[in-house]
């Protein structure tokens, strides 16, 4: 149980385009999902907290107009990187928390974004 | 990470035991997690401690002392596949996880 999927696993795009990443909880309902970014050899950096049916809460320094988050259902959250630039190239990881659990977060496999 | 300290790198030998320490800020504490992360992959859950003491799970054990703001992850009978980054994370009042920078463990033959 507690499986989280992400799609796509990797994506290469041109500078200026937008990329959408999906995060799904497959066998549980997630009222809260988290979006992280991780650069090589660095720790996870929380970008935003996504709550079902409400606006996402962004961490300081993260542009909400550039990283659009939609949590339309209890099993799906999406992150759209708008007008991507090479510096947005990173490993994007989502996690989900079962609404009935404690604090444990279940991680998706991650999405490797490369912007040319 | 925010007030979470763990060593940057450690090296150990196959078959040995290694202890990875983590200290954290105690205010608003709601549990301590350990995750394992292999290069290029997402973190995988190892353990969760919310009460003091040692939790054993196979070759891996995790210890917590809430009064000292201290935890450690103990890995026994090390295997080459245990070479990875080990992340310590604290759950706060707002239920977000605050992550340490991770300890990169290299297991040598």
Image (cartoon, coloured by chain):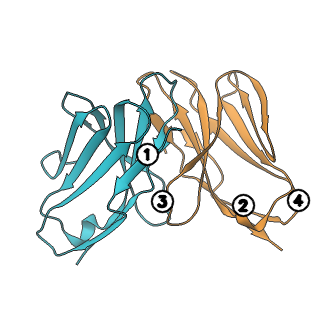
Chain colours: A cyan, B orange
Q: Secondary structure at mark 2?
A: helix
Badge 2 vs badge 1, beta-carbon distance below 8 Å: no
In the rendered image, which residue does mark 4 sit on? B16
Confirm whether residue A29 shows in the render. yes
In the rendered image, which residue does mark 2 sit on? B82
Measure the alpha-carbon separation of dots 4 and 1: 33 Å
Badge 4 vs badge 1, beta-carbon distance below 8 Å: no
User: Which of the two residues, B101 or B16, is positioned nearer the viewer here?
Assistant: B16
Residue at (55%, 23%) from the top-left corner? B29
Figure quadrant of residue A12: bottom left
In the rendered image, which residue does mark 1 sit on? A4
**Are marks 3 and 1 in one subunit?**
yes
Q: Nearer the viewer, mark 4 or mark 1?
A: 1
Is residue A99 found left or right of A116 in the rendered image?
right
In the rendered image, which residue does mark 3 sit on? A42
First reached walking from the N terminus: tag 3 or tag 1: 1
Is residue A109 found left or right of A79 in the rendered image?
right
Chain under disc 1: A
Measure the alpha-carbon separation of dots 2 and 1: 23 Å
Measure the alpha-carbon separation of dots 3 and 4: 27 Å
| Residue A64 against residue B85 in the figure, above or below | above
Where's the C terminus of chain A, which quadrant? bottom left
Residue at (47%, 35%) from the top-left corner? B97
């Amino acid at each position: 149980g507690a499986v989280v999927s992400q799609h796509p696993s990797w994506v290469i795009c041109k500078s200026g385009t937008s990329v959408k990443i999906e995060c799904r909880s497959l066998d549980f309902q997630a009222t809260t999902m988290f979006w992280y970014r991780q650069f090589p050899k660095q720790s996870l950096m929380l970008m935003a907290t996504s709550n079902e049916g409400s606006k996402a809460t962004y961490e300081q320094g993260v542009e909400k107009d550039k990283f659009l988050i939609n949590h339309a259902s209890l099993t799906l959250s999406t992150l759209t990187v708008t007008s991507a630039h090479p510096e947005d190239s990173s490993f994007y990881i989502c996690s989900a928390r079962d609404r009935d659990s404690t604090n444990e977060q279940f991680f998706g496999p991650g999405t490797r974004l490369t912007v040319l | 990470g925010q007030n979470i300290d763990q060593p940057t790198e450690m090296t150990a030998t196959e078959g040995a035991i290694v202890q990875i320490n983590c200290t954290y800020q105690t205010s608003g504490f709601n549990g301590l997690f350990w995750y394992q992360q292999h290069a290029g992959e997402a973190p995988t859950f190892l353990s969760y401690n919310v009460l003091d003491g040692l939790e054993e799970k196979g070759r891996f054990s995790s210890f917590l002392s809430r009064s000292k703001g201290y935890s450690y992850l103990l890995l026994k009978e090390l295997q080459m596949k245990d070479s990875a980054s080990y992340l310590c994370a604290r759950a706060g009042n707002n239920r977000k996880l605050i992550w340490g920078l991770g300890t990169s463990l290299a297991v040598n033959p």
